[in-house]
Amino acid sequence: MPRLKIDGREVDAAENATVLEAAREAGVAIPTLCHHPETGALTSCMICVVRNAAAGKTLLACASAAEEGMDIVTNDDEICALRRDTLALLLAEHAGDCEGPCERACPAGLRVPQMLRRLQQGEGADAATIAREDLIFPGILGSICTAPCQKICRRGQYDQALAIRACHGGAAETFPEKLEQPQPASGKSVAIIGAGLAGLAAARVLAQHGHACRLYEREDRVCPGLDDSIPDAIREAEFAFLKIWNVATFLATDVDMNESGQSESVMTLATCLEENDAVILAIKDAETPNHERIIGAREETMPVRAVAAGKRAAWRVQALFAGEEYQEKRMFNSRLGRLEENDLEAYAVERKERCHECEGQHALFMVSRAGMNAAPDGNASELSCAAQKEAARCLHCDCLQPTTCKLRLYAEEYGVTLGGKRNLPHRIILPIERAGAILFEPGKCIKCGVCIALTRKYGIDPGMTIAGRGVKSRVRAALGATLQAGLGSVAEACVRACPTAALAFENESHCEQP
Amino acid sequence: MDVDLREVDRIIETHGRDRQALLPILQDVQRLFRWLPPEALRRISDVTEITPADLDGVASFFPMFRDTPGGRHTICVCDGTACHLKDAERVFDASLKALDIAPGADTDARGQYTVQKVQCLGCCTLAPAVQIDGITYGHVRPDTVLEMIEDFERATAAAADEKGRPRPLPDAPPEIRICLDSCCIAGGNGRIRDVVDETLARYRLPAVVKPVSCVGLCHLLPLIEIAVPDEEIYTYTKVTTDAVSDILLRHIPPPGAFGRLRAAAERRLEKLYAGESESPVRRVAPREPDITHFLNIQCRIATEHSGETNPADLEEYIRLGGFAALRRCLDMAAAEPGAPLNGDAIIDVIEKSGLRGRGGAGFPTAEKWRIVRNAVNSTKYIICNGDEGDPGAFMDRMLLESFAYRVIEGMLIAAAAVGAEQGIFYVRSEYPMAVERTRLALDQCRNAGLLGDNALGDGRFFDAEVREGAGAFVCGEESALIVSLEGRRPSPRFRPPFPAYSGLNGKPTLVNNVETLAMVPWIFRNGPEAFAALGTPTSPGAKVFALAGKINHGGLIEVPMGMTIRQIVEEAGGDVTEGHTFKAVQIGGPSGGCIPASLADLPVDYEALTEAGAMMGSGGLVVMDDTDCIVEMARYFLEFTQMESCGKCVPCRVGAAQLLTMLDNLCAGRGDTVDLDALTRLAEVIQQQSLCGLGKTAPNPVLTGLRHFRDEFEAHIHGRCPAKKCRPLLTYTIDADTCIGCTKCAQACPSGAITATPYEAHLIDQETCVQCNGCVDVCPVNAVKVE
Ligand SMILES: Cc1cc2nc3c(=O)[nH]c(=O)nc-3n(C[C@H](O)[C@H](O)[C@H](O)COP(=O)(O)O)c2cc1C
Ligand code: SF4
Ligand code: SF4
Ligand code: SF4
Ligand code: SF4
Ligand code: SF4
Ligand code: FES
Ligand code: FES
Ligand code: FES
């Protein structure tokens, strides 16, 4: 049994073990993409690189035998830099978006494609729930948002952008919320200064988590700046939580921003601080004092930004209460960006057909709020029919496995940044292929060779193969066969073995936000 | 076109049904149908052991296999290093235009011609070279493309007439030596040989035409030598067809009535080669006195007897000492019949000689042999690597065409040393003549009992066969070569295990380069000490180089190691062209790097070159002068490696493409998008992280360029090309004082950037100018200035 050091620890490796196996045995994680226990080393991804300090050389952990006297370093700066730069190369040819352009563009981060899929499948209530979770006030925003998501919607490049705003507005309206009881009281209280969209959004999130909220507003009504054109019904429905959850609302109450002074007649920031566990400053153009328990949530002119600011402030308060460091949750995102004319067709062709209902034959159907409401008595089935058709136009730009894809996780872990003079795209856009419930997105394939090795091992005829060479090489079913035939009886195993979402089940995941 | 599956079946019958038959079957199918029809592929997968995945993976890997029907004839425009430097790109464009081929297509509407780019036809000194089917044309210019195609059509028509006509070969002693290697035929020797034959027949001259091994004087072609017994040998270079009869008549007295012709011939010749010294020196080329030097500084080991021996004459090879080395080895290693030979004795000699692999990396040959010898396995293979994919090198081709017996003898000695029974010559299919001659030589050796049951004495069997590659640089990498032989997609494997431990079919396999094996017999005949005495302590012996680029004499040379680059350029190469200065050499092809003139006193030695950031590589040596751009050269090599990357591992697959984009940007006037630090880092990542030598060495041309000519890279970032090579970076202006208003430039400008203003100074509109250089070419007074 060879004895070697891995990250300074003495390890006895099994006979014929690879460095990777020895490390895993010893509990040291080494990243791998093309490694699969059933196939033997494929040595294509180069991510498992480690250094043998005893020889002063780097080596591939998945393919190199663990040898007596090795001194393996798995994670120093040089190795991490090599991994990062290699990942960046993989991502340079990666043709896919981890999150759809629309959801990245929405300041409040609405999971647009997920919501649209619910609508498309006639699950309007679920769609409304997603919209409410992410947008807090989907109905209001459905009326007044400037809809940056629609400006970037990829379908817009193809013919016309999805009517995203109308979809979440309509869904919210058609499927009104039945407010449930908030979580049990936490015993904490938060003062929120400013009852604009930011303050209200923060209040809603915090109240839902059982925190007592005190909302202060200078004017004599909540959200004074809100556009008058918004139907009262929507406004009332979305602010109903204030009453139902008993959020203490102090209208026409000016709060003196003086941090230290106290006064009988006017409310001051100092008093707020004293009476509450945290304070959220949700007003326009005010400097947030540097205080651990004061959290700023700028009331922005753009409504959706204000909502986003309120949400973020609420999360920070949550973190404060939990005694954690607040961290902005922004995962690494592979981005496809704007497509060339000819790539667009290849990109869209199979995606359009993911709408089974009508096999992609929809005429362009614009949903307007009026259109959605056109049905008599708000008949939900009629309504969702319009929304359904609109939603079916979505190209599903988001990824099928955004939370399990190893490429994304490693990109996040090693801090890959893309763009600039460093990274030039080298991607080829090819249409999606389908085998039953399995989708193959060639653009997301990293040519690791695992599915090829598996189909070979299990004697699938014709099996998968790699065709062409160099940057133009691609994985495909051999000799022009269908994906179904190429993957054969090991299709599911291949999906599970695929390190990215290149091979994925159509209906898996989609749901939870990372 | 209907696909006759019976033909496919017949091909399968000839090659067998196991996996190893994959490449040969595909090659024959391609030859037959001029593409690989899907029906044929399906048939192959149905009736053989070959899986669809392997078929698809391999068929789509090699550019020679087409997935659409190709034309009846294939025009291969060489885009190898030397041809590239001589504007092959424009010849390619002109060919497409001449045949009216639609943009994006490669075959003309009538299905007659397919035009494609190929890497090095092995006639670099005739650059730019074009090959139509078997016929090679040298020094092709864009404006002579049509002429070339017409000539080809005439030639094929004539060949159809002449089929089967035997060539008369009189058996009298005077020899007319002419090299008929592929490069020399392309250089005109083929046509000269026809005229020689005709002349001999017409005057009934008692002489034989002897096809001989190549002397490597590519720049002086066509070339013949007259060897009259007991007389000096006369070399005639750049022979014209008109001069042939005069040359022959001068040396060989014609019988009877033709006698008086002779004196006249002599007179005419003297006129033709005026200035020749009184007494003809042995091997002097009239008017080219420094050819002596070209030959004299050389040292013939792999190319021993060059220009004297007939490549297809086994008896002659034996008469000149051939196979003596093998016999000596067999004596040295003698063992009881039935017992294995004592190969260690042989390996000791190789060790003493210090021989290192000529395939690129310079691995000590003895060490490799010993590993294979010590491997305990009853089956061992030897592979002679003749894939030679470096776009600027052709020495292995020449060695196999001219000295196949020597390589075979080397292989036999290696077989005796390591205990192998089967050998394979892996030769690229772009070298049809090398394939054919090696096959022929093997057949002759087999008939003579040198191969087969008793090849290694006392009933010890050894035999070898030729297997054709399909044209991919990466197939020269030993592990890819082996997978390719096994009928798989030629992607390199992770090593270790090295082939010497586990190679072809998992058996210990010795992979040696052609030249390495060609060195071996000499070592045993002359002693390892003599070999070690040549060259430097760490790099003994001699090395064959393909010398090309901006020098007066290009060609194949074999020089002792340790000679300086300057000596090679100035003495063997006859220095750079008059009026230009020597700037750098690019050594080692796409894996190597450039060495600036300031380091030209560097000896050619594995270590010294590596230290300078370059690499011995296979031995391509391209000389650059002040008009050559280092950035452009790096770009060219990267384009090559990028195209040849197998695509298996990420750093090479994507990294090379990224690096190429950066270099493209530099050369195309988008230099401001390039960051040299990012470029360097990318190059380092590719170097460190790639799986095989192709990727690991691909950034070398860039990195050496940056090391020695960083200012040139920086200039490109700022939109200047100091060598004035990268046209998009140039500004064309007309000097008003010099311009005579002849309007020629205005007529020549394809984009209408110049308005004709007769008798007045002309003006170039910078917006419209496409930097084609057309105005410069036509201006009679050099008024066009390029900055
Ligand atoms: C990309 C690449 C291409 C190569 N091409 C050749 C080649 O054309 N001929 C050759 O002999 N060796 C070539 N080699 C080197 C071989 O892998 C191997 O080292 C060599 O054949 C060993 O022979 P030697 O020990 O006699 O040098 C190549 C290596 C790489 C990485
Ligand atoms: S496959 Fe992974 S990296 Fe690619 S888009 Fe999906 S989650 Fe992102
Ligand atoms: S319309 Fe506004 S709120 Fe709605 S998804 Fe788009 S950006 Fe987000
Ligand atoms: S097509 Fe769908 S997923 Fe893509 S950007 Fe538009 S709404 Fe988002
Ligand atoms: S599709 Fe196959 S080759 Fe591509 S990433 Fe997935 S497993 Fe690897
Ligand atoms: S380095 Fe290049 S040629 Fe070598 S295995 Fe990797 S991709 Fe293939
Ligand atoms: S190379 Fe080791 S896991 Fe991919
Ligand atoms: S023949 Fe063209 S480069 Fe060699
Ligand atoms: S002259 Fe024969 S190889 Fe060039």
Image (cartoon, rainbow, N blue to C red):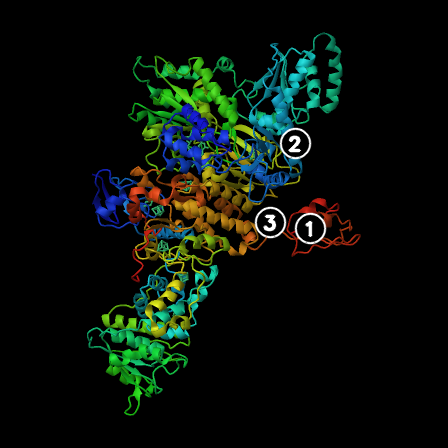
- Label placed on residue B150: 2
Task: Choose top left, top right, bottom left or bottom right for residue B295.
Answer: top right
Q: Foreground residue, B531 or B153?
A: B153
Which amino acid, mark 3?
Pro
From the image, tell me which residue sits under label 1.
B785
Q: Are marks 1 and 3 in contact (CB under 8 Å)?
A: no
**Viewer-closest of B12 and B525:** B12
Residue where numbered disc 3 is placed: B722
| Position of B207 relative to B24 (above/below) | above
SS category of the residue bearing label 2: helix
Residue that sits furthest to the top in the current view: B256
**Does residue B510 sit above or below A370 in this rendering?**
above
**Ligand 8 within 8 Å of the CB at mark 3:** no
**Residue A366 or B531: which is nearer the viewer?**
A366
Identify the image quadrant of residue A378.
bottom left
Give the label, 1 or 3, closer to the camera: 1
Of the numbered discs 2 and 1, the one sitting upstream in the chain is: 2
Q: Is residue B414 visible?
A: yes
